[in-house]
Structure formats: C-alpha cells, structure tokens
Amino acid sequence: MSVRSKFVTSAAILSLACLALAPVAVAQDGGATYKAKCAMCHGVDGKGHTPMGKTFKIEDLTSPAVKKMSDADMEAIVSKGKGHMPAYGSSLGPAGVKAVVAFIKSMK
C-alpha cells in the first residue's frame, strides 16, 4: 500500500470516527450549558428539587410528559422561555438550543 493510499484510508477512518462521535459531543456541550444555565432552577438531575424549582413548581424534566414532547416544542421553550424561565435563544443560538434539548432528552 502506498503512502498516499495509507493517508487517504487514515483520513477516511478519522472522518467516520468524527461523524460517529458528533452526537456525543453535542450532548456533552448541551450538558455543560445545562449545568451553567438550567441546573440552578431545574436541578442537576432535572427533577426541579431546588428552592427555585419548588417556588415556581417546575416540572420534572425526566417525567414521561416531558420526554414525550417533540424536540421542536422543547426548543421553542428553551429559545423563547416559558413562565418564569427566561429565553435563551439569542444567547445560545439554534445549535446551542438543540444541544441543551438533546442533553435534556438524554437525562434518566
């Protein structure tokens, strides 16, 4: 095998590995954003057992009702806010909002 074909093969394998790991990276970025912006009220575990969560009767993000929500509906809430929750669309951007929603959907 020539050096060039080894290089092309290695590049192809690396590209496939990056594509396979992309959803994990998004969820991890969403996790960091969630911890920085959401956990104060929603709790690290998403259950809302925080002083702010109890005050505002925040819904458990791990509940079946939340899990059944479409990504679009959840993205709209994160982007535009809801009730006492502020809007994060302009600060996170579409990719950031999608990452947070992906993280929330991954919570057990």
Image: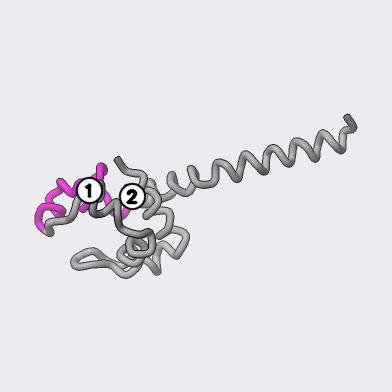
Residue 6 is situated, as x and y percent measured from the top left of the image, at 82, 33
Q: Which residues are magenta?
A: 35-55
Question: Per the image, is 38 magenta?
Answer: yes
Name the quadrant containing residue 1.
Answer: top right
Which of the colour schemes (rainbow, by chain, secondary structure, one colour) is used?
A: one colour
87 relative position to 93: left or right = left
Q: Is residue 40 visible?
A: no
The residue depicted at 37 percent of the width and 48 percent of the height is: 103
Comparing 31 with 37, the one in front is: 31
Above or below 68: residue 75: below
Residue that carries the numbered disc 1 in the rendered image: 63
State whether residue 71 appears in this view. Answer: yes
**Residue for badge 2:** 104
Badge 1: residue crowd in 10 Å (few <14, some 14–19, many ≥20): few
Kindly state the secondary structure of the residue where label 1 is placed: loop
| Three-letter amino acid code of the residue under disc 1 | Ser
Q: Relative to residue 93, is residue 14 drawn left or right? A: right
Question: Which residue is more in the foreground, 60 or 90?
Answer: 60
